[in-house]
Image: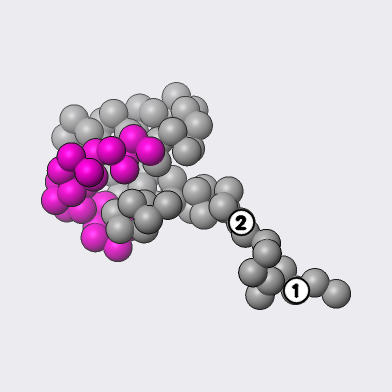
Amino acid sequence: MLNIATSPAIRFDCLQVMDIIYRVEMKLAGHESIWCIAVKNAIRSGKPAPQIIDTIKDMATDNYNAVADVLGVSLTHRITKL
C-alpha cells in the first residue's frame, strides 16, 4: 500500500499553490498599495493561480522589501522558491 504522506514520488503542487493564494489573500486584506490592489483584483477576477504567483515573484524580484513588508519574509521566500 502506498503511503501518500511520505512517498517522494507524489507531489501536491496544486494544494501548495492554493494554500499560498489563500495566505496571500489574507495578508493583503487592508493594504492599499498599488501592487496589493493589483494582486487582489487578479484573485477576485479568477486569474489562474500560477499566473498570480508568477506576478508576485516578479514583484518580489523588483522590490523584495515592499512585498516582504506586506506578506512577511517567510511567505515571500516561499513564493520565490516555487
- Does 48 sit left or right of 67 as displayed? right
The structure residue drawn at horizontal position 42% and vertical position 52%, both measured from the top left corner, is 82
Give the labeled residue for mark 1.
3
Q: Is residue 56 visible?
A: yes
Give the labeled residue for mark 2.
12
The structure residue drawn at horizontal position 22% and vertical position 44%, both measured from the top left corner, is 61
Q: Is residue 30 visible?
A: no
Q: Where is residue 72 drawn, in percent x and y?
A: 24, 58
Going from N to C along the chain, the mark reached first, 2 or 1, is 1
User: Residue type at mark 1?
Assistant: Asn
Check the image and name the residue furthest to the right.
1
Check the image and name the residue furthest to the front.
9
Check the image and name the residue furthest to the top.
45
Give the answer, above or below, for where 1 lies relative to 19: below
Query: Magenta region, mostly helix, strand or loop?
Result: helix
State how far apart marks 2 and 1 are (Cα).
14 Å
Asked where in the image residue 58 lies, by quadrant, the reply is top left
Write the start and end of the magenta stretch as one range: 54-75
Q: Where is residue 63 drawn, in percent x and y?
A: 15, 43
User: Residue type at mark 2?
Assistant: Phe
- Does 63 sit left or right of 30 as displayed? left
Give the answer, above or below, for where 6 lies relative to 30: below
Local secondary structure at mark 1: loop
